[in-house]
Amino acid sequence: MHADFSRLTFRPGKHYSAVLTQQGRVQLDADANEQAAIERYQLRTLAADLIGRHGGPAAAAGFAIGHVPGSHDVDDLVIGDGRYYVDGILCEARRPEPGLAAPDDDGGGGGGGGDHLGNGDPSQEPAGWTYWDQPDAYRDQERPGDRLPGEFPFLVYLKVWERSVTAVEDPEIREVALGAAMPDTAARAKVVWQVLALPGAELGLAGDGASRVREVREAFDAWAEPRERPTARLAARARRPERASEDPCLAHPEAAYRGPENQLYRVEVHHGGSAGCDATFKWSRENGSVVLPVTSVEGVWVDLTTLGDDDRSGLTVGDWVEVTDSASVSRGEPADPLQDLLQVEETDLPGRRVRLSAEPGPEVGRLPERHPYLRRWDHRAPRGRDALPLSGGALRLREGAWLDLEDGVQVYFGPGGAYTRGDYWLVPARTATGEVEWPRNPAGEALLRHPAGIRLHHAPLAWVTGPAAAADLRRTFGPLTAPAPSRERA
């Protein structure tokens, strides 16, 4: 969740059932967010316990996979409307109602009867989606990896995860009555679902036959399990730097964390893989929440709506940034896999633009409807004998050693981890204690923890064996209050 939080305090193991507000106390974002997290956890746990790993209501089960009518080749799929639950998370496939358009002038007699754009009878609009126009998958027919498998059989599945959305991506979140100078208020958590395809060979399966439904489900569960259970682990601590500032106005003389402000550090995997090979990471002292909307991209120059109100939310020469948009974030992929972290080389304050070390990828920054933006990261170029080298603008990930971030904050990657792009950990740092908030054992040693996210969830939908043949892999359930079948009297 990239948003300007003070910290995230929800811990399922504490078994808190509610946050109780006390009179006359300071109201914190962490308390309200914990209450929302408690309710979400309880509801999803209850749904998963009752429904199972995945399932939909028998009368309104969504995500039925079908073939496009009249098509003899499988180059698109129809996604049926309705609801489906994956690990207790509600996914809805129905399109928003288009509504009826009112006339633009007073003289027309149409009375909202439609227009030349086809905004007429809502009943003529498709209820569900198709593979190519599903809202958060952003499939591109020009990308070979986005196309459906060219050989049968293949499995169609549902991928579900949750991400944060701010007013940068959804301007309707912002209350304009507060004025243009007022920052946005709350962010939103969004459920992202994507209907994707997997060749049967990747599951170790071949051939057709609807009778193999159980075998297909078991093979898919084996494929999904390692993707849902990350092996990467990290620990965090604070240690007084050797060259710590002695200014008493900055920190207590004995403080381990030497930063001048409370921060929420975000340590995030940039390129996945293994340590010592391809894996890299980046970090932000603001939970990656410093984002600036992009208005246009002209070569290495990027025009922004603002350069930030202050040093905390602005840009300076030397900052590492990434240019991205809603499509790249929802896909879970970098805009440019080879070069997506760039460095600010010049700022033009009057023109509200920056010059970057290279041109952003061709797929971001050019489509306003995808809400492009620039995100700032706070790591710097390596200095010193033990500094981590950079790779593509991110830091090389090293396991089995304490790594310095800044101001005494250190992180430790546990050996043997497999890292996935987007894995992240949050480390609150506090000036009052001169420490970071991290779980410890009775001896005071920092404990290794799996990533706070991203949590992926999967469910099989259909086993496609031919141009017009598919076995339904969904599960359905009836209402608890369904009437029992009547018994005939003997």
Image (cartoon, rainbow, N blue to C red):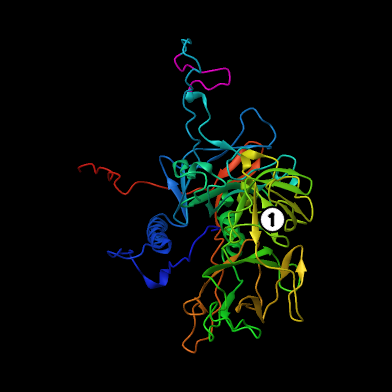
What residue type is disc 1 on? Glu
Q: What predominant SS class does the magenta segment belong to?
A: loop
Up-down: is 448 above or below 199?
A: below
Up-down: is 120 above or below 453?
A: above
Q: Is residue 144 left or right of residue 490?
A: right
The C terminus - image quarter: top left
Tag 1 residue:
322
The percent position of residue 23, horizontal first and vertical second, equals: 27, 64
Q: Which residues are magenta?
A: 111-121
Q: Residue at x 61, y 47 (%)?
A: 326
The percent position of residue 70, horizontal first and vertical second, equals: 64, 27
Q: Nearer the viewer, residue 159 or 312?
A: 312
Q: How many marks?
A: 1
Can residue 155 be seen here? The reply is no
Q: Nearer the viewer, residue 483 or 363?
A: 363
Q: Nearer the viewer, residue 166 or 350?
A: 350
Q: Nearer the viewer, residue 234 or 263?
A: 263
Up-down: is 262 above or below 155?
A: below
Q: Residue at x 58, y 45 (%)?
A: 136
| Local crowd size for mark 1, using a 10 Å CA cut-off: few (<14), some (14–19), many (≥20) | many
